[in-house]
Image: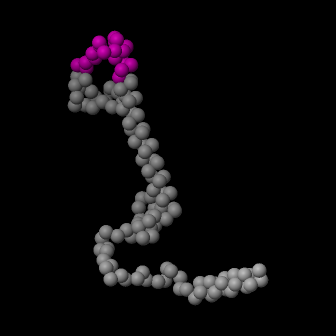
Amino acid sequence: MPHLQQWIAGAAAGVLAASLSLVPLSAQEPPKMKMTTEIPDGITTPDNIETQLGDLTFFDGVPDADTTEKIYNLYDFLQAYQAYLNGLKIASMDAMLRGIEEWGPANTTVVQFAELMDSKALFLTPNTTSVY
């Protein structure tokens, strides 16, 4: 068993010595391969983009953790906003149905306005150019 421990210690020392002699990866240039194609600057993702969300940071086109969180938070907000806008239409149609039902049974009563809508109409989504 002592020989195995000496071998492991020697191997660990060799690995440690080899790793200390390495130059950090960030200081090295990537190797140029024979078939390397230069990428035009106009289609690469910059490492930093200033937006109304704040600074977005990327490495090789991949967002860092802070940037990812900002983007997901924006996406969540946009989805909630779209759900609200879609719900507004449904709420307006429900209110119109309830108003029509005050005049008579559904699907047999027609309500028609004598004039075009204006700002005094109590509707959520009317427009002023359609005849209702």
Q: Position of residue 22 (x, y in %)?
A: 55, 86
Q: Position of residue 30 (x, y in %)?
A: 42, 81
Q: Indicate the quadrant where residue 17 lies.
A: bottom right
**11, above or below 57, in the image:** below
Q: Quadrant of the C terminus?
A: top left
Name the residue at 39% across, 38% down: 85
Q: Indicate the quadrant where residue 81 lies.
A: top left
**74, above or below 127, in the image:** below
Q: Quadrant of the N terminus?
A: bottom right
Name the residue at 39% across, 33% down: 88
Magenta stretch: helix, strand or loop mostly: loop
What colour-coding does the image apply?
one colour
Q: Which residues are magenta?
A: 96-114
In the visual, does 35 lie left or right of 81?
left
In the visual, does 119 lie left or right of 66?
left
**63, above or below 98, in the image:** below
Residue at the right extreme? 2
Whether 106 is among the magenta residues is yes
Foreground residue among 52 and 48: 48
Q: Indicate the quadrant where residue 87 lies.
A: top left
Whether 34 is among the magenta residues is no
